[in-house]
Image: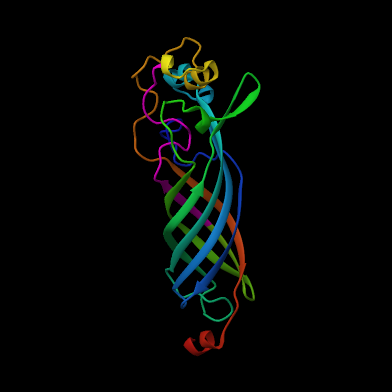
Amino acid sequence: MGDLNQKNPLKVSGVAAGVFARYNFNGYISLGAGANYGIISAADSLSSNQQNRIRNLSFTTRLLETSLTAEFNFMEYIPSVSKNVYTPYVLFGVAYTNYNPQATYLGQTYNLPDYRTEGVAYKNTTVAVPFGVGIKYNIAGRLTLAANLSYRTAYTDYLDDVSGVYPDKATLNDPIRAALSDRSATNIGTAGTQRGDLRPHDTYFFTGLSISYTFITQKCYYER
């Protein structure tokens, strides 16, 4: 969800993979650390909105995220110990994300942060807040299969390299910078006119399946 996708909160635009380790304090609460790699992308040329198609911006961003998240099970769940073989759960936490929006122009790929397409310099790292829901199921022994959908509110508006207004092209001092800033066929990018949606944060999400193995301690049996 950002300046090139303003309305569809379930738009899937790339693949992702990750690993995690989690400590279960009991059958309800756990704290985990994880790392995720994913790709997000969007293109105005595929939009149903004519104004967006005229703007003609696009991007692809590779995300590398590390996170710390807490999970809360609605039902007591310890694989092979508790009587429940499944439970819904919610999660929230904090993440640190590296991103680098890119675009292809005349057959060549450019790292957009290097070209300051809105005349603004921004970092390629951001803090994000993960939150989501899921369900866990004890498929066999100590193995758990889980499905979840988790959003990240990023504290940047530049995951897609689009945020505010068009800069004065005369100050860009580079024809490539000017072309990457305004990719419309009719050069609509008058200085100071709106380029993005002006919202302060972009949002991305991961959805998928995970499989985990739980190491059972004597304490787990005692609590049972």
Task: Choose between 115 and 27: the one closer to the eye.
Answer: 115
Q: Position of residue 172 (x, y in %)?
A: 45, 19
Task: Look at the magenta stretch and give its main secondary structure.
Answer: loop
For residue 113: magenta?
A: no
Q: Quadrant of the N terminus?
A: top left
120 in relation to 155, above or below: above
For residue 159: magenta?
A: yes
Q: Position of residue 202 (x, y in %)?
A: 42, 40
Query: Over which residues does the magenta segment extend?
Result: 148-168
Quarter holding residue 75: bottom left
140 in relation to 37, above or below: below
Q: Position of residue 214 (x, y in %)?
A: 59, 74
Q: Residue at x 43, y 61 (%)?
A: 90
Q: Is residue 83 left or right of residue 122?
A: right
Q: Count of labels shown?
A: 0
Q: Is residue 149 left or right of residue 156?
A: right
Task: Choose between 175 and 192: the one closer to the eye.
Answer: 175
